[in-house]
Amino acid sequence: MALPEVLRNRDFDLYWAGVVLSQIGTRGAVAANFYQVYALTGSVLQTGLVGAGQAVALLLLSPLGGAYADRLDRRKLLQWAQAASLVVAVALSVLTLTGRVEAWHVVLSALLTTAAATFDQPARQAIIPAMVPKRLLAQAIALLNPSRELAVLIGPAMAGVLIAVGGPGLMYLVDAVTYAVLIVVLALLHVPPLQQSGPPRSVFGSIAEGARYVVHRPLITRFMALDLSATVFSAYRVLLPAFAIDILAVGPTGYGLLSSAPSAGALLATYTVFRTVAHSNRLGRVVLVATALYGVSALLLAQSRWFAMALVAALLLGAFDAMATTIRHAAVQVDTPDEIRGRVTAFYQMSSRGGPAIGDVVVGAFASLVGPVVALTVGAFGPMLVAGAFWLRPNAVRDYGSASVPEDDDVPGTRGEPPAAEGVDARPVK
């Protein structure tokens, strides 16, 4: 069986491997952050402060990170962001292993790491079209998203084992090593320089240009709203320590497995996701169904009283999230010209990454009043209701067709023509 064409690209293969390894460390460290704060404080509300630190960094710095991703060498920007995160991981590891760590140290580390990621993530997404032909862009993203889920599968599970063996500090040390590996991998890539379409603007002028582009693309703004409905209302990750320790009584190892289960579900759905993105011309409807079923899965998790049932619910969460996320990300990347891609990606990550962080705060605070079970039960109806509202009337999301591009628009790193009508694919649903 022949490899997909996108995997016969040396630079993409190197980049893919480096990103997966780095994400394994990052996701393991995030899981360790939540567990460590809950272990130190016993408070779901204070555990949610990890998400608050992430949200502050994402909302304040994402537009700036996107502007620099469209102005600077994206590979070097990635290396500097990884280096900053490496320093934070080493510092938190030392504090933890020496027994001097406090909850606020962990929250601060989450804020600083996310601050670095606000420069990392736009460049990380925007560099992909410079490595692969645009006709293969949707396929590349369809592979990268499950790879991210592989990292979320391995990272938290590894965190659970390392916490049980040597405490969270050991996980943070491994995280630092993965950052170092990606820095080296980036140095080996051959990436063409970014082509500017005109004289450079001021940083704030560049941010404003990116904001105008997003505002005038109904498909992007509505995808952001749909994303937020799931990640804010059904923010389950902040509740997993309480479920694992207090409700299911499975300890750190069970917590690691429960945290990894959504990614296992995403990986099991990889083939279906890849085939759907490549061949379906009704992707908007697929996104809406997947979002609604994500809410149903969150409701199942909230009502689980047996570990096996909770694992099944978490598997389903990952599968439906992978389907919706892959389609949304591919649509945004295909819809956006290269010279503005970093800024658009930055604004989009304010929902795709900021939503879960805000959800940690909101759901964590709500759970501190009514308990984790009631909090997730109520929140699970959010994505169901929003997806239903999008389904009932014509709009850019429901009418979205496919993430394909014309065959002749095939040069990596070049600008493609925008879609024919208001951000909706030029080939409407038949």
Image (tube, rainbow, N blue to C red):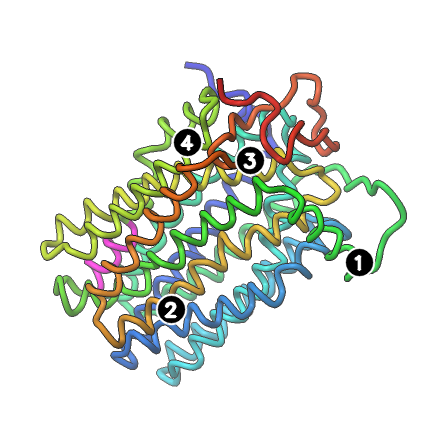
**Do the numbered discs 3 and 4 sit on residues whose CB atoms are within 8 Å?**
no
Mark 1, Cα crowd under 10 Å, few <14 / some 14-19 / many 20+, is few
Residue of label 1: 205
- Dot 1 falls on a residue whose secondary structure is helix
Work out whether 33 lies above or below 234: below
Percent across and percent down for residue 309 are 13, 48
Q: Quadrant of residue 388?
A: top left
Residue of label 3: 331
Q: Amino acid at mark 1?
A: Gly
Query: Whole-Å distance between the Cαs marked 1 and 3?
Result: 25 Å
Q: Amino acid at mark 2?
A: Val
Percent across and percent down for residue 214 are 65, 47
Query: Whole-Å distance between the Cαs marked 2 and 1?
Result: 33 Å
Residue of label 2: 362
Disc on the earlier residue, 1 or 3: 1
Horizontal arrangement in the rendering, residue 156 relative to residue 346 (left or right): left
Membership of 371 in magenta stretch? no
Residue of label 4: 285
Disc on the earlier residue, 1 or 4: 1
- Dot 2 falls on a residue whose secondary structure is helix
User: In terms of depth relative to the viewer, which is nearer, 220 or 75?
Assistant: 220
Disc on the earlier residue, 3 or 2: 3
- Dot 3 falls on a residue whose secondary structure is helix
Membership of 253 in magenta stretch? yes
